[in-house]
Amino acid sequence: QVQLVESGGGLVQPGGSLRLSCAAAGSSFSIYVMGWYRQAPGNQRELVATTAPGGSINYADSVKGRFTISRDNNKKTVYLQMNSLKPEDTAVYYCNAYRDWPYVNSWGQGTQVTVSS
């Protein structure tokens, strides 16, 4: 498994921006699908965005045009730039590393994002 540590969460006003980071420990970062997920109180964890080793990127419809996921394989870090934040973006954001084989499905501890005036 992979150790993941998120940072960058906090309190921001509607319309503001935040940048989340997720640093991975260990080797082989470049072969993982890296993703950001979020979970609001009372809701299931949901996909926000993923970036695959081949470069393909996927976003949830709710964040398209506002959020940007990127990865730096040399730094073993994945980022989530969040712009035009809305109160409904409030959630705990989790970083995920995934690979089919050998199987890896690791989660970070989560970072709280609160969008409120």
Image (cartoon, rainbow, N blue to C red):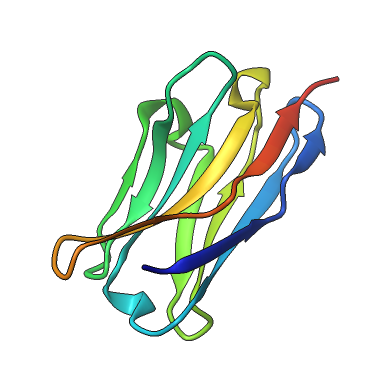
**Direction from residue 101 to residue 68 in the image, left or right:** right
Residue 104 or residue 96, whichever sits in front: 104
Classify the position of the N terminus by image quarter.
bottom left
Residue 79 or residue 68, whichever sits in front: 79
Q: Position of residue 6 (x, y in %)?
A: 62, 57
Q: Residue at x 60, y 19 (%)?
A: 88
Q: Position of residue 12 (x, y in %)?
A: 80, 34
**Direction from residue 32 to residue 66 in the image, left or right:** right
**Direction from residue 56 to residue 13 in the image, left or right:** right
Classify the position of the C terminus by image quarter.
top right
Residue 79 sits in quarter: bottom right
Q: As displayed, is residue 8 above or below residue 93? A: below
Q: Position of residue 78 (x, y in %)?
A: 50, 64
Residue 57 or residue 6, whichever sits in front: 6
Q: Position of residue 2 (x, y in %)?
A: 42, 69
The residue positioned farthest toward the front in the image shown: 1
**Direction from residue 22 to residue 107 in the image, left or right:** left
Q: As displayed, is residue 89 above or below residue 105? A: above
Q: Residue at x 59, y 18 (%)?
A: 41
The residue positioned farthest toward the right in the image shown: 117
Q: Residue at x 60, y 26 (%)?
A: 89
The residue positioned farthest toward the left in the image shown: 101
Disc tally is 0
Q: Residue at x 53, y 82 (%)?
A: 75
Q: As displayed, is residue 7 above or below residue 1? A: above
